[in-house]
Image: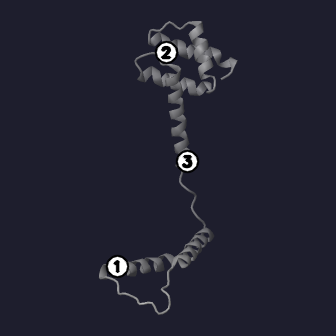
Amino acid sequence: MTDADRPLFAMELAIIAEQKRVDLTATLLHSYFDDLSAFTLNEIVVAVRTLRKTTQYFPQPVEIIDLIRGIRRRALAETLALPAAPLSEIQIAEAKQMIEDLHQTMRWTPPAGARQESLPEDEAEHVRRKADALRRFRA
């Protein structure tokens, strides 16, 4: 906030002070202005108007600050939750190749002459399904 915001700031605090039956002195007004000066007037107005409807008592600066921070967090979360842009065919092909390369590096081959044990039926079925899924993915 800037000094130009003082009249609107004072008006918003005067309204909530009147509603909550608090004497708004010049000292209290200056104290709140100093405590909240790191925030924009718009953020403070939104927070104070919200608190007018949701709190029974005149809010402390920390309550206004907490509400502003909560609003900022929700706005940031909504911004970050935007859906990702669709991938191009080239990007999809590159991703498939990276997965295939990773799969090849992680494939374990038993040493020559090592005895291969048969897998239990459930595990063999799992391996078969996994191989089918990889084939479908590569297609």
Mark 3 vs 2: CB contact within 8 A: no
Judging from the image, the colouring scheme is: one colour
Label 2 sits on a secondary structure element that is helix
Mark 2 crowdedness (10 Å alpha carbons): few <14, some 14-19, many ≥20: many
| Quarter residue 126 falls in | bottom left
Q: Is residue 16 left or right of residue 126?
A: right
Q: Identify the image quadrant of the N terminus.
A: top right
Distance from disc 3 to disc 2, alpha carbons, whole Å, reads 34 Å
Name the kind of residue labelled 2 in the image. Ile
Residue type beneath disc 1: Glu
Residue 49 left/right relative to 121: right
For mark 3, give the secondary structure: helix
Left or right of 4, for residue 62: left
Pointers 2 and 1 in contact (C-beta within 8 Å): no
Please say if the residues under marks 3 and 1 sit with CB atoms less than 8 Å apart. Answer: no
Foreground pick, 118 / 14: 118
Q: x, y (%) of residue 100?
A: 55, 76
Of callouts 3 and 1, which one flags the residue occurring earlier in the amino acid sequence? 3
Q: Which mark is residue 80?
A: 3
Mark 3 neighbour density, 10 Å: few (under 14) some (14–19) many (20 or more): few
Categorize mark 1 by other alpha carbons within 10 Å: few (<14), some (14-19), many (20+): few
Residue 60 in the image: state x and y as whole percent: 50, 19
Tell me the amino acid under the disc marked 3: Leu
Q: Which residue is mark 1?
A: 123
Viewer-nearest of discs 3 and 1: 1
- Seen at 59% across and 72% down, the residue is 98
Q: Disc 2 designates what residue?
A: 16
